Amino acid sequence: MKMTANALCFNHELKIMAMKKMFFLFILIYAFGFHLQAQTTSRAGFDVNVYNPSAKQFFDRYKNIDHIVIFYDKRDIATIEIFFRGKPQPTFGERYTLTFDGDLYLFRKKYGKFPFPNPTTAKLTNFQGIGKITDVNVIYNLTTTMQRDSLVHHFNFYTFEGNTEPLLGPADYRPTFKGDILKLTKKLEQDFKNWKPIAITDSMIIITGLVEKNGTIGKLKLIEGKPSVYSNKVLEFMSREATSWLPRVDGGGKRPWNVRISVRVNKDNSMKVSIL
């Protein structure tokens, strides 16, 4: 099956070094398989490779890292996966979900300042023989591989019929807090005021807990930050207030699953609670 691109909109802001350097752009079109419960009509993929040396110093510092894969939620960077050098091929090493405040903290703690690429506005608008990408049955997703001197944008592109949403195998849902996280945070802030005076050893702490099949949470423990009166108070608060959850569901039904909860105290004593 041979397909050609009719139009590709690509508008990516690049950091250009003082020295004039050439950048290259090429599109590789290839067919790929994608299992969907809905009936697929066409499938294809693109790689767009852009010269970008902004991460060169990072890769020089961490020579064991081969490349980093970036996943997006809409236009924002959501998750990164780090692959280490290995033989015969790079091996998966670490995953950070940057929409979870705890992972963002741990990533910055370990790697410091990181030259994330600017949020890409790369998008497909039309594909000859398939139609406009705005059609309800035309879907693509975008990931970016960050290498020492380049960014490779991967477009996975497919169409389907029969459902308005593609079903990529059995349902798979993480545990979800049933309450309002903003209200939970406000309640914690109010309790925190009543705890004073209390020493804050770590402005960021991360705890883990097990959400059972019946939606309760238990086995809460501290996994990031030093044990203290403050961390004990937070553990007590979560065991008392964050009690109602939707359990993990996958192809085998409901099952117990660990969640992580991060709590950050800001300089103005406001707080941020994040859950993964």
Image (cartoon, rainbow, N blue to C red):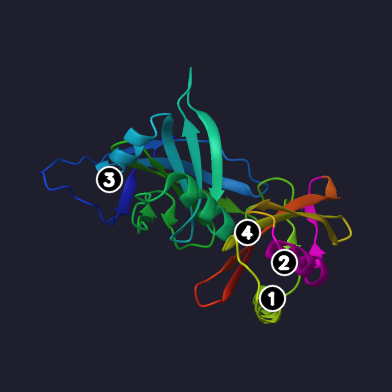
Q: Residue furthest top?
A: 88
Task: Name which residue lies at 34% across and 40% down.
Answer: 58
> Sequence order check: which comes first, mark 4 or mark 1?
1
Going by the image, does 236 lie left or right of 39? Answer: right
Quadrant of the image for the C terminus? bottom right
Residue identified by numbered label 1: 188
Q: Secondary structure at mark 1?
A: helix
Residue identified by numbered label 2: 234
> Sequence order check: which comes first, mark 2 or mark 4?
4
Number of residues whose C-alpha sits closer than 10 Å to that of mark 1, classed few (under 14), some (14–19) or many (20 or more): many
Residue identified by numbered label 3: 54
- The nearer-to-camera label among 3 and 2 is 2
User: Gap in Å between the C-alphas at discs 1 and 3?
Assistant: 41 Å
Q: Secondary structure at mark 3?
A: helix
Residue identified by numbered label 4: 205
Are dots 3 and 4 in contact, CB under 8 Å? no
